[in-house]
Image (cartoon, rainbow, N blue to C red):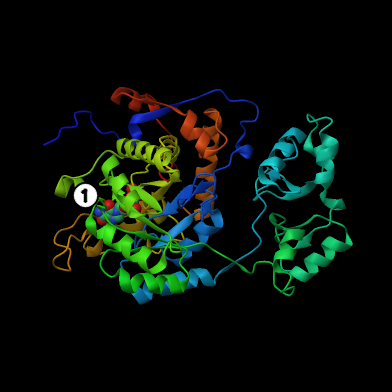
Amino acid sequence: AIYINEPSHTFNEYLLIPGYSSKECMPVNVSLKTPLTKFKKGEKPAIEMSIPMVSAIMQAVSGEKLAVALAKAGGVSFIYGSQTIEEEAAMVASVKAYKSGFVPSDSNVSPDMTMADVVALKERTGHSTVAVTSDGTVNGKLVGIVTSRDYRVSRMDPATKVSEFMTPLDKLIYAKNGITLGEANDMIWDKKLNALPIVNADGTLNSFVFRKDYADHKENPGEMLDEKKRYIVGAGINTRDYAERVPALVEAGADVLCIDSSEGFSEWQKLTLEWIRQHYGDTVKVGAGNVVDREGFNFLADCGADFIKVGIGGGSICITRETKGIGRGQATAVIEVCKARDEYYEKTGVYIPVCSDGGIVYDHHITLALAMGADFVMLGRYFARFDESPSEKVMIGGTYVKEYWGEGSNRARNWQRYDLGGAKKLSFEEGVDSYVPYAGTLKENVDKTTSKIKSTMCNCGALTIPELQKNAKITLVSATSIVEGGAHDVIRKEKNTTDK
Ligand code: MZP
């Protein structure tokens, strides 16, 4: 046997050491954009996400409702594969049938920011118009806009406050949500605007219609603003019925697939990837996994995976380590695989995104996973807690909880995930059936989580995920200092169990 004498570690055994934060290091300037699929040096990935979060390929997590909510928030869901091919394809098709509105502008500032902040924001997003909302978020009330002309003037005095330069609401041309694209376009041209803000009934910003939006959609001026664009959705596949399942999912409109397996360093994954490449070339994007070391990563990279998932045994509902004695501490696995990914990129010029799958307990574990090199994380327990997950919400002991069960539990019976050939059945359980605290809507939770990630990134002096990966300083902590990390030596008045 080969012995690795260094213990493998979990995220909870690490902390980030703050780096230098310049005055540009404000959450509003942080971009969480990240690649989902591989790309060559100098090229762009076929699919990018606005937030580094995807939902687990699980019955209790990724149905069509959650997929739409997560796509709206900028991430991607992978519809679960432990259902018939027809059922899974129908779920994918129903997500694709939703039509998204014009994407809400990510250019939001609050009135008390400076024009230097606006200029930085404009340069980052490329938008000609910036929304000024009461608190700088898309949920705040629209109180004004700052246009390209204002930036030019403000360059002379970047310290000026936005409130002094913005066009206030009472002087503003804006439209109520529900008008047609043709009507919006007429207003844009009549009033010589670059962009028309659209507000919801409660006065919050819904979106901007830019001239470019009209150019992209002008063949259909009657289209209601809420139409045309489709949400990105992924779907899980297995290594048994891919010859039937993949065509059905592609036909239904799946944008990306992922082989769902508890252990991905196998010939079964190679055969699946080969079949997809033979039949679809590179047009069908497919992730593979899960692996926990350099050899596993290199194998799947050479087989042609579009992204590679890391994690064995760390999932909240997973008992694989207890039942089979296989696995690796999630942080150690991510660190080693990401190092292999960087070496592969150096050698081949092909960047294969790495997904850290399972074991995220606190929001800051996401930031740690990213700092350790992951491009995005896959979460099950986290999303299962929300209104949009497919599972039942029940009251237990006076509190609302949602059901959450593993794919390797007798309830899900996803034998294909654990398949090593042989009988088509789950011989023993590798997952449990459980409850998780109910936590409300996806949007409010994802907003809170991403704002924590952005805030930590600012403390580390990073405005993008690649900057965090390059510059983060990470320290192992002792068992005693983990205790010091929570509230201690006080009697807490109350604890919100859903707020991590
Ligand atoms: P978590 O976010 O709940 O900690 O972990 C979710 C991940 O656990 C999934 O993405 C999947 O990789 C893994 N999983 C799903 N079912 C089981 C099981 O029954 C499991 N053992 O380990």
Residue 67 in sight from this viewpoint: yes
Residue appearing at x 45%, y 73% in the figure: 252
Which residue ends up furthest to the left in the rendered image?
1
Check mark 1 vs ligand 1: CB closer than 8 Å? yes or no. Answer: yes
Closest to the observer: 109 or 307?
Answer: 307
Percent of width and height locating residue 415? 22, 64
On the picture, is 310 further left or further right than 133?
left
On the picture, is 337 further left or further right than 112?
left
Using a 10 Å C-alpha cutoff, classify the residue at mark 1 as few (fewer than 14 neighbours), some (14 to 19) or many (20 or more).
many
Percent of width and height locating residue 313? 25, 46
Residue appearing at x 33%, y 57% in the figure: 404
399 lies above or below 219: above
On the picture, is 266 further left or further right than 106?
left
Q: Quadrant of the C terminus?
A: top left
Q: Quadrant of residue 216?
A: bottom right
Closest to the observer: 42 or 155?
Answer: 42
Report the number of discs: 1
Residue appearing at x 75%, y 39% in the figure: 111
Which residue ends up furthest to the front in the rendered image?
348
Residue 210 in sight from this viewpoint: no
Q: Amino acid at mark 1?
A: Ile
368 lies above or below 261: above
Residue appearing at x 31%, y 52% in the figure: 289
Which residue ends up furthest to the bottom in the rendered image?
86
Percent of width and height locating residue 194? 80, 54
Q: Which residue position is annotated with label 1? A: 319
Closest to the observer: 349 or 317?
Answer: 349
Q: Quadrant of residue 369?
A: top left
Q: Quadrant of the N terminus?
A: top left
Percent of width and height locating residue 9? 29, 33
- Element carrying mark 1: loop
